[in-house]
Image (cartoon, coloured by chain):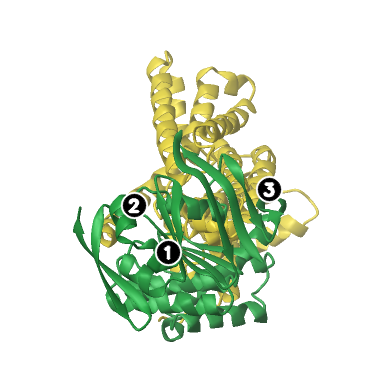
Chain colours: A green, B yellow
Amino acid sequence: MSLKAKNIFVFVHKRKIIDGVSVELERGNLIGLIGPNGAGKSTLLKTLAGVQNRATGEILINGKLAEQLSAEARARTVAYLPQSRRTEWQLPARTLVMLGRFPHRQAFKAPSAACEAAVDRALSAVNATEFSKRSVTTLSQGESARVFLARALAVEAPFLLVDEPTADMDPYHQIHVMEILKNVAKSGVGVLVVLHDLTLAARFMDKLLLMKQGQIVDSGAPKEILTAGNLERVYRISALNGKEGDRAYIIPWSRV
Amino acid sequence: MRNLPSYPALIAVLLTTTLLAFVASILIGPTELGFRDLVTAIFGESPSMTTMIIGEIRLPRAILGLLIGSTLGLTGASLQGYLRNPLAEPGVIGVSTAAALGAVLAIYTGLSSSVPLALPVMAIGGSLIAVLILRALAGSGSILTLILAGVAISSLGGALTSLVLNLSPNPFASLEIIFWLLGSITDRSMDHVWLAAPFIISGWVLLVLSARALDILSLGEETAISLGINMERTQLFIIFGTAISVGAATAVSGVIGFVGLVVPHILRPWVNYSPSRLLLASALGGATLLLSADVLVRLITPGTELKLGVVTAFFGAPFFLHLILKTKATFNT
């Protein structure tokens, strides 16, 4: 099973945002999408999720054109968590997570036992069971972000696209969220994550896609991508390097 | 957490209050009627004065109160869910103003006095034109564009209404327009009911069909699309549903504001903030509120009846200010 994009072009207000990108996500992958501001990372994620219209190119879900699937079938296959994670209404956390079951539910019917069970699994995957009855607006930022992640997990789609899951979080919660995503990938879900934090990207991702000006300029294992040359060319920074066990890490250090 | 009554219990309570307000609307008025009169009117053989009062004066008024109150509550709840804004109301997307403009034109041109049906028909026309302009301006499905387009249409409709009043050579016509704009369901006949009801009810159907989408929309448009919601269809249903039902309601009652703002706001915690469950609750709540307000105007000032729209604005506007202050407070923290 795979989620494939072939030669995607996206224009927003006549500006070219995605410039001929091809990507492939397979079940069990944990792939980081990195690149400087304005590189087109979020737009690429939205396009894969079917939220953003593309000008040309194909998106194949398990070998089928995305357009050939019904909206519900597509929603059941590809889950998407956008960067903005807020709601106007003071919904209880559990109710919010249940919204993720929408593509599995029938209109005007109470949620099935399977849906309830999926919501329980999603809540426990993000350690949110204990505050599941509280209103999301009363939760701390870290708690609320985990509830929104649980909403995306509750879809139980084979592919999960997440936009900057660690934004505005303290290190404890950043690491917590990355561990959750790692577990999700281990359970067989293909996970594609937009990340700004290169240290987290090096520490947790199996593979990185490096974007610049709407194109993917390099891809591979973190240590192959986060090289001094790439960092200088794409990010215009230099970084400190180190090793912990067999895992290389980097710390962004200065502008060049 | 507070212990809330279950959803069916809440609906049962609201159904009861609606029914009580409906019966009160038939029994209370200048001619005192008892419950026995009502029974006689329904089951009695020979037509009497009482039967006439109930059948031709009180009943149409009560039915209109029910239909219009439900419409205002339902459309308010739908728009708030759709726009994810607790301050939204049919007025916000310009539908009420445009409907009022259509009706004002009917009065100004004298069409309404030669052909009585012109008044409602032109009001519905006004709201439909507003909808079509909205579709053209905000067809992409973005919520922000829709709000801005609604503001523009409201201002334009208001300006054109003022222009008509300004140009009116006949002070009596101006007076009629102004009184009509105040909003009331006094002296309406079953003709008004038959004309408005089909439109109002088709509007309701469109809105109820969008109920599930409203729940998902509380997570934002992008998440909603990724969960399989068809945003274009949802927008079409909500805008047309609102336009048709509010247009027809405004046609027979004039502008009655704030019901759609107050009722969903009060009932929201009682349905645990679920936008879909808020729809039916707000429809019943709106009907109860409008029917009770309409009984109230008959009791307070039996001679020159206060206009319903004046009463709802009198209580609604301060409530609106209170809501803005509250929203501002949550934004600041």
Q: Nearer the viewer, mark 3 or mark 1?
A: 1
- Taking A1 as reference, is A159 left or right? left
Q: Quadrant of the N terminus of chain B?
A: bottom left
The x, y position of residue B154, in whole percent, is: 42, 34
Residue that badge 1 annotates: A89
- Residue at the image point whose x is 51% and y is 42% from the top: A10
- Near-viewer residue (A99 or B278): A99
Q: Chain of mark 1?
A: A
Give the chain letter at badge 3: B
Q: For residue B251, say whether it is visible.
A: yes
Pointer 2 or 3: first along the chain: 3
Residue B55 numbered tag: 3
Residue B300 seen by the camera? no
For mark 1, give the secondary structure.
loop
Is residue B92 found left or right of B61 in the rendered image?
Answer: left
| Residue that numbered label 2 is attached to | B320
Q: Same chain for the residues at labels 3 and 1, yes or no?
A: no
Observer-nearest of A109 and A121: A121
Three-letter code, disc 2: Phe
Residue A217, disc: none
- The kind of residue tagged 3 is Gly
Residue at (37% x, 51% y) in the render: B316
Same-chain check, marks 2 and 1:
no
Of badges 2 and 3, the one in the foreground is: 2
Quadrant of the image occupied by residue A26? bottom right
- Disc 2 to disc 3: CB gap under 8 Å: no
Does B238 sit above or below residue A162?
Answer: above
Residue in the foreground of this view, choosing between A19 and B105: A19
